[in-house]
Image (cartoon, grey):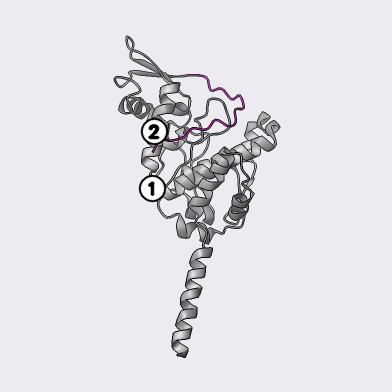
Amino acid sequence: MKQFFLALVFLATLSLNAQDRVNYSQVSQDLLQNIMDKKSYNKQVEILANSTLEDLTSQLKTDNQKIAFWVNVYNSFIQISLTENPKEYEDRGAYFKKPRVKIAGETLSFDEIEHDILRRSRVKLSWGYLRKYFRPKYERKLRVKNIDWRIHFALNCGAKSCPPVAKFTPEDLDKEFDFMTTEYLKEQTTYNKETRTAKSVSLFSWFRADFGGLCGARQILADYKITPKKPKKLKFGDYDWTLSLGNFRKIPK
């Protein structure tokens, strides 16, 4: 009888622990959805602030899990921080470097989330060709194994030329990223059939190594049917850094 009672207590404890366990992927989605719906997001911000490195590494194991989580977090805190203090955007260099996202026992900047975690420790101003070495433990644990170039068409830095903000899930990330990539490039690209010259977003130039160089960028335009053929030349339009918040896009199911 005593053993039966102990077994019941053990099972009840397991059940409680399972109920209490935070799903961090869902938290990132709820955070962004609440921002989109103009609802309170304080609960999700607090959960992330109290998370530990162990918490996140135990759940974010695949690149899709990491990417969906971090893109949602990045886009959410851009909206939060610039809504609270839009004047910060006047000095963008300082804005992106400032530690502000409390998570996993650290306080991260937007640059750290983008270039250290999502771009696997790449130097920001190197076209993506230079890598940082001897990185801290949290970064090595949380960063992706492989860079997915489509993050550049999913991250929203608050500017008018940025891709719209959408909510991403690890289960459907490929489909969601392809949709956002296609829609954004359609809006940002023009093509001259006679000269086979495409004019597209400056992101292709700034992070060219992520795309496989400019040749890879031209191939992407053809593969995603943005241009009828692979362009012979690729030019870049001016990036509009005018502050623009609340630019949300819903991804069709």
Looking at the rendering, the stretch of residues picked out in magenta corresponds to 237-253
* Magenta portion: prevailing SS class: loop
Residue 239 is situated, as x and y percent measured from the top left of the image, at 53, 23
Please state which of residues 143 and 125 is positioned toward the viewer in this rendering. 143
Taking the view exactly as shown, the residue that stands out farthest to the top is 194
- Disc 1: CA contacts within 10 A as few (<14), some (14-19) or many (>=20): few
Residue 50 occupies which quadrant of the picture? Answer: bottom right
Residue 111 visible at all: no
Left or right of residue 16, residue 97 in this image: right
Label ID, residue 171: 1
Please state which of residues 222 and 168 is positioned toward the viewer in this rendering. 168
Q: What distance separates the C-alpha of mark 1 from that of mark 2? A: 15 Å
Considering only vertical position in the picture, is 43 above or below 215? below
**Which residue is at 52% across, 69% downward?**
16
Left or right of residue 67, residue 113 in this image: right
Is 248 in the magenta?
A: yes
Considering only vertical position in the picture, is 40 above or below 83? below
Residue 224 is situated, as x and y percent measured from the top left of the image, at 33, 28
Taking the view exactly as shown, the residue that stands out farthest to the left is 229
Residue 25 is situated, as x and y percent measured from the top left of the image, at 48, 51
Question: Which image quadrant: the C terminus?
Answer: top left
Question: Which image quadrant: the N terminus?
Answer: bottom left
Pointers 1 and 2 in contact (CB under 8 A)? no
Kind of residue at disc 1:
Glu
Nearer-N-terminus badge (1/2): 1
**Which residue is at 52% across, 59% downward?**
22
Label ID, residue 179: 2
Residue 166 is situated, as x and y percent measured from the top left of the image, at 49, 37
